Amino acid sequence: MSPQKQAYSWSFLGIAIAAVALSAWGIATLNTRSDRAAQYERELNHLQAVANRLDALEWRAISKKNVDSELKEELEQQREQAKLSLAALAKTAPSSMQMQTVESSYETYATAVNQLLTLLESNQIDEALEVDETIVDPSYAKLYETIIHATTGAAKTSASLTYWANLGSVLIVLFLVSALGIMVRRYLQVNQQIQNIVVENLHSQQKILEQERQLLESRVLERTQELQQANIALSQAMSNLQQSQIQLIQSEKMSMLGQLVAGVAHEINNPVGFLSGNIQPALDYVSDLLGLISLYEETFPQPGQAIQAEIDAIDLEYIRDDLPKLIGSMQEGVSRIRDISTSLRIFSRSDSTSPVPYNIHDGIDSTLLILKYRLKANEIRPAIAIFKEYGNLPLVECYIGPLNQVFMNLLVNAIDALEESNQGHSFEEIKAHPNCISIRTQLSNDAQSALISIQDNGVGMTDEIKQKIFDQLFTTKAVGKGTGLGLAISHSIIVDKHAGTLDVNSTPGHGAEFVITIPVTAKPKSVAPPENTFINGSGATVQQETLSSGQP
């Protein structure tokens, strides 16, 4: 734009602003005068209403032909209202002459009304009627005419002022639109100039930025590769460290447990062997002595009073009947101790450097025998029922000690889950829905893998817990009751040591099932285990074992 056009635009803008200011002042003045005229019109209407009420009171007085106290009070109130209206009219009247006309008309009417009321009070009825006809009615008509004329003039004045105020508003809008158009056009011109400058600067700096970007990308790529390599190495180191920790904990735990259990079993074996070797001869000796006593009684049926008294005192017949049972019970207890010792030795067998053939059922039974004290009934709950469904499994090549440890961890977790589900339930409620653990073994469809299922009817677990159940240090048990290592170690033993799988199936409120799959013949760890399928009970035997506190 040329300088002359720019000067013209700014001049027009200044004129428009001045015109807008002047128009705004004029519109404000017109609006003020219009409001005053409207107020004047409202006050005239109010005065007309007061005059109408006075006329009505006048007719009441004439009809009654008397002026009582109530009528006087109402007349006084209307006169006060008239004074207030006249005072308000004096403030808003457009001219003093028009105000004088209204006041004069009202005063004439008010004087005539007073004269009429005075005549009525003095009981001059005829004179009062004549005054009403000759003075009051004409003065009321003149007052009404004066008010109507003033009201019409005020309405016209208000309408005229409103018209000119609206016209001024339209002019202001036009000036504002023109000024706004000039300002917008000027803004667009300045903005275009700024954009041109910015574009030139961008073009000049684009090459520099591109060079810097390429250099930065190359450095970031190099650094990213370095960080990725370091992250991979760190992740591998962490994985190796965690695996080493698990193996170390497992090895140390199994070593200490094996030494302790082996020592206990050895110490038990000595007295058990002594008892087992002497109970049968003792039973034979007792039988011989009881036979000798019987022979003596047959030979000497009358032993004498002293001997007979002693026989009665010791209750010989009860001893003869109970002593063999007592020794038989001792023999049964020794047999149970021997079974426990055997189970301890089976559970704590030391591992060889390679897998060895093993009867999986022996490991499960020995683990159940060790945990028998937790399965018995107590004052809180009935005994936990064990359902065993063993299939025809061949000897499985495995690491015996670690595999027994897996059975121990899974069974302990099942018992803990059942005890947790018992919380808040009475003995009778638990008895109505008894706790049970089901153990099932099967061969896979291709007969290459052994599958062991350990299932409880406890509280179950959510999908969120199932995703973390084999993580290290993850536990749902209370503080001090769980370490979060049992299932992680079990998973490592099955997956890493036996090239198998350990899966969990569970729904909240419907218990949990852990399924172990291990190859019958040991395979390299990289070989994937067979699919997790079962044969439907081919040759399987089903038995139920219920343990109670009354068993030895």
Image (cartoon, rainbow, N blue to C red):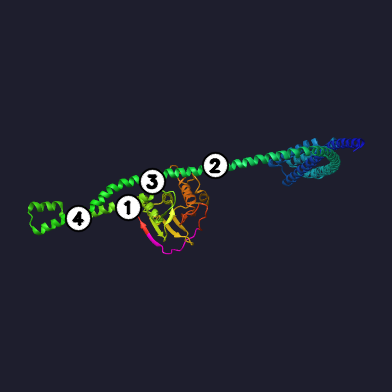
The front one of 305 and 151 is 305
Q: Earlier in the sequence, mark 1 or mark 3?
A: 3
Q: Nearer the viewer, residue 65 or 100?
A: 100
Q: Position of residue 389 (x, y in %)?
A: 41, 60
Would residue 534 be counted in the magenta stretch?
Answer: yes
Q: Which residues are magenta?
A: 532-543
Towards the viewer: 180 or 302: 302
Question: Does residue 481 appear in this view?
Answer: no
Please identify the dominant SS of the magenta region.
loop
Earlier in the chain: of badge 4 and badge 2, it is 2
Rounded to the nearest angstrom, the CA distance separating label 4 from label 2 is 69 Å
Q: Which residue in the protein does label 1 denote?
A: 339
Q: Which mark sits nearer the N-terminus, 3 or 2?
A: 2
Q: Position of residue 420 (x, y in %)?
A: 43, 49
How many other residues sit within 10 Å of disc 1, few (<14), some (14-19) or many (≥20)?
some
Which quarter of the image is occupied by the N terminus? top right
Task: Report the amino acid beneath label 3.
Answer: Gly
Q: Secondary structure at mark 1?
A: helix
Mark 2 highlights which residue?
237
Q: CA distance from mark 3 to mark 2?
A: 31 Å
Give the farthest residue toward the front. Answer: 353
Measured from the top left, where is residue 151 in percent x and y?
A: 82, 43
Residue on which the image places disc 3: 258
Q: Earlier in the sequence, mark 2 or mark 1?
A: 2
- Quick check: is 112 in the magenta stretch? no
Q: Alpha-carbon distance for marks 4 and 3?
A: 39 Å
Q: Between tags 2 and 1, which lies in front?
A: 2
In the image, taking residue 348 as reference, residue 215 lies left or right, namely: right
Callout 1 amino acid:
Asp
Amino acid tagged 2: Ala
* Residues under numbered marks 2 and 1 in contact, where contact means CB atoms less than 8 Å apart: no
The label on residue 284 is 4
